[in-house]
Amino acid sequence: MTKKIDTALKDLTKALEKHAQIVGLKPVPRKKAGRAAAELRSAAAAYANIVEAKTGQTNPFIDFLDPATIDSLSKERELIVAHKAAEDDAQKKSEKKSDTVESKAADRE
């Protein structure tokens, strides 16, 4: 195996073991389990991308999900990205507005 695949495999194995350890606790800590699941997904995606780039094979993990689930997850991801972008825009507008108020107050002094 190439070094990239070896490294990705080690990262995936570590992420899987960490996830299993955390979800095996009683009670399961939700935040830790969520972070471990995110790390596991990231490691699996990295591994799949490296294997696909090297061999041309499709993602080996995709068979676990039916097309409707994949479509649903894709739409959910798009909604999350759109929501985050809207929040960022609102925050920028709020910051711009507060900067304007502060500059007007400084001009008065």
Image (tube, grey):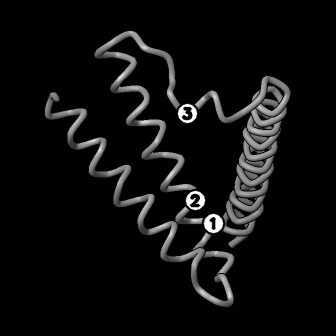
Q: Is residue 95 left or right of residue 52?
A: right
SS for tag 1? helix
Quadrant where the image shows the C terminus: bottom right
Question: Which tag is nearer the camera, tag 3 or tag 1?
Answer: 3
Residue at x-position 32% and y-position 51%: 11
Lower position in the chain sequence, tag 3 or tag 1: 1
Q: CA distance from mark 1 to mark 2?
A: 5 Å
Q: Nearer the viewer, residue 67 or 72?
A: 67
Crowding around mark 2 (Cα neighbors within 10 Å: few <14, some 14 to 19, many 20+) is some
Q: Residue at x 56, y 55 (%)?
A: 38
Mark 2 lies on residue: 37
- Picture coordinates of residue 68 (x, y %)? 85, 27
Mark 1: few, some, or many residues within 10 Å (few <14, many ≥20)? Answer: some
Identify residue type, mark 2: Ala
Question: Disc 1 marks which residue?
Answer: 34
User: Which of 17 and 42 lies nearest the eye of the viewer?
Assistant: 17
Q: Is residue 98 above or below residue 63?
A: below
Numbered label attached to residue 61:
3
Tag 1 near tag 2, CB within 8 Å? yes
Q: CA distance from mark 3 to mark 1?
A: 19 Å
